[in-house]
Amino acid sequence: MRNLIDIMDLSEAELQSLIEMAEDIIQNPTRYAQACHGKKLATLFFEPSTRTRLSFEAAMLELGGSVIGFSDAANSSSSKGESVADTARVVGCYADIIAMRHPKEGAPLVAARTAGVPVINAGDGGHSHPTQTLADLLTIWREKGGFENLTIGFCGDLKFGRTVHSLTAAMSRYAGVHFVFISPEELCIPEYVKSETLDPRGIPYEEVRDLERAIAGLDILYMTRVQKERFFNEADYIRLKDTYILTPEKLKSARADLCVMHPLPRVNEISVEVDDDPRACYFKQVMNGKYMRMALILKLLEVAV
Ligand code: CP
């Protein structure tokens, strides 16, 4: 039985196979419409979510399956003190597969040890968010035609932005990739990402403060929200939250084929005027996330279509 706790749980070949399956689902949705008939997905969301929870639920419904779960920990018995391990063991008696979001790093891994059914990490604290990475990879694949020889700029909260950590790990496996990390000093990319992922592979990267100077050299610009919920001090959040705002003016010096990405939700990091620019890909990411989650559910449930 397989889980998806970290994006590196999937080999390059498996990622490619998920992308090919997502492309097939996009082209032939009716072929998949009953693939999970009789199967149940449980969405256990101990933290707020719009895209991840609803796209998992839409994914299972479009595969002909059913969905149970909760979207607020306050409505679950965790509010009475039940552990993650016990919750997972119980829900594993009702559902065939679990998608879990939790504010504590490692909680989905703990759940996977007792659930008895596949567990998918739908975001754990500031650590990782592998299914957002699946959405990101399909977007890069569709926009750029592959993963090699790309210069990827991550901008904003690179400390707490779990989608940044997961996508950096995933993209570090491809030849010729170069990272530009654009952040204030206080929100820079964690040391462990450099020491565990980038340095051992000799992957080139830069850490810079100035988006305007970096933007011209990028193939992909991955904007991120400053993660208010991970700050201990509101004054620090207020001081840092508007450090970077992408505007049409700033995009003038970018390449014509730049791909602007953002995992969303957006607060103020991309002005709405950018939404009409053909380089804006963040709403395509949303749709791609549903197709990749459909492919992932089929893979983990070992459903052949
Ligand atoms: N990208 C993402 O994880 O969005 P939600 O928090 O709305 O699920």
Image (spheres, grey):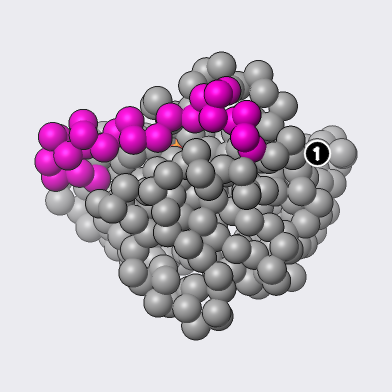
Residue 63 horizontal/vertical position (percent): 70, 40
Residue 282's quadrant in the figure?
Answer: top right
- Label 1 sits on what residue type? Ile
Q: Is residue 76 above or below residue 165?
A: above
Residue at the location (84% across, 46% down)?
24
Q: Residue at x 37, y 59 (%)?
A: 189
Which residue corresponds to mark 1? 26
Q: Residue at x 20, y 44 (%)?
A: 231
Depth check: give the residue in front, 177 or 92: 177
Which stretch appears magenta?
230-254
The answer to whether 63 appears left or right of 199 in the picture is: right
What secondary structure is marked by label 1? helix
Whether residue 15 is visible, yes or no, is: yes
**Image location (x, y in percent) of residue 196:** 43, 77
73 vs 129, nearest the viewer: 129
Magenta stretch holds residue 234: yes
Q: Position of residue 129 (x, y in %)?
A: 46, 53
